[in-house]
Image (cartoon, rainbow, N blue to C red):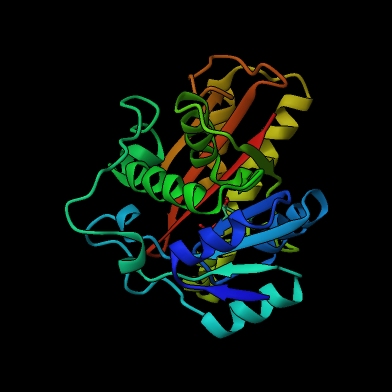
Amino acid sequence: MRVFQSPHELKKELRGLHVSIGFVPTMGALHNGHISLIKKAKEENEIVVVSIFVNPTQFLKGEDLDKYPRKEQADKRICELAGVDYLFYPNAEDIYEKDEVKLCAPDVRGYILEGETRPGHFSGVLTVVMKLLNIVNPTNAYFGKKDAQQLMLISLMVKQMFMDVNIVPVETMRDNLGLALSSRNEYLNAEEKVEALKIPSALKKATSLVVSGVYETKTIIDEMKMILEPLDVSYIAIVSREFIPIATIQTGNSMILVEAVVGNTRLLDNIWL
Ligand code: AMP
């Protein structure tokens, strides 16, 4: 595995290869969720590039930028073992200059749900993903369904900016109790980990309601609220794949998204129905 810090050097190296490139952008503290993206990228491309960059522009003031877990040595080892060909590991100064061109998230879909609790977050995400895609110029780029709104906005950006990359959604990996894997799970203590399981339980309940023929979203949300109590729930939303709120579940075109704060940790999860 070769490690690059300089965007220009990586770009030059990759441009000379003339092979299919699978790209997995991450913020590090790698877990099995990230590894599943890497595995899929390896299956579908000749070479795999992973980036590890804790992107400052997607954190709001007062958020966890400074304490976000950083595990350089362990992450490098994981990438090596997973068969990554190139690891891109830049610093903020390698990616950003002063007085920058920025991308803005769309006014509606970038400022609902996660974008409402974290206004401006998705503009930072889109800006960095645009930069990373321009550096790597991958054939396929892999993103987790766990961050469903992020995935939707990146797909919109690629379509609306006429970009030449295939965005590949990857299923959410969970631990053996059902909690969606996340680098932020490290912030949870033992008690909070148990509390956090209310999130997958509520989504499981929603699924079983739909399977039993309950399609009315209000009924589903009310049942989920009961299971999630007493967590601090930021939102429960049932939307179409285009993120338009819906009154009844349309199988094959619906998503249930939850954000809840456990202790001081914001956790996201969803199911696609
Ligand atoms: P992050 O390092 O949290 O920015 O995540 C990097 C990529 O991994 C994003 O595309 C995430 O959606 C994806 N990801 C994070 N957690 C999971 C998970 N549990 N299962 C699958 N993909 C995930």
Residue 62 in the image, given as x and y percentages of width and height: 23, 62
Residue 241 in the image, given as x and y percentages of width and height: 59, 24
Residue for point 53% across, 16% down: 246
Instruction: State the quadrant of the C terminus.
Output: top right
Residue 259 in the image, given as x and y percentages of width and height: 47, 45
Residue for point 48% across, 47% down: 134
Q: Quick check: 206 left or right of 107?
A: right
The answer to whether residue 257 is above or below residue 170 is above
Q: Which of 134 and 60 lies nearest the eye of the viewer?
A: 134
Residue for point 37% across, 33% down: 110
Residue 79 in the image, given as x and y percentages of width and height: 67, 73
Q: Quick check: 179 left or right of 259?
A: right
Residue 233 in view, yes or no: no
Q: Farthest residue toward the right? A: 43
Q: Quick check: 197 left or right of 11?
A: right
Residue for point 55% across, 53% down: 136
Q: Farthest residue toward the bottom? A: 73
The answer to whether residue 82 is above or below residue 226 is below
Q: Quick check: 20 left or right of 146?
A: right
Within the image, what quadrant is residue 17 found in? bottom right
Within the image, what quadrant is residue 216 found in? top right
Residue 247 in view, yes or no: yes
Q: Quadrant of ligand 1?
A: bottom right
The answer to whether residue 194 is above or below residue 212 is below
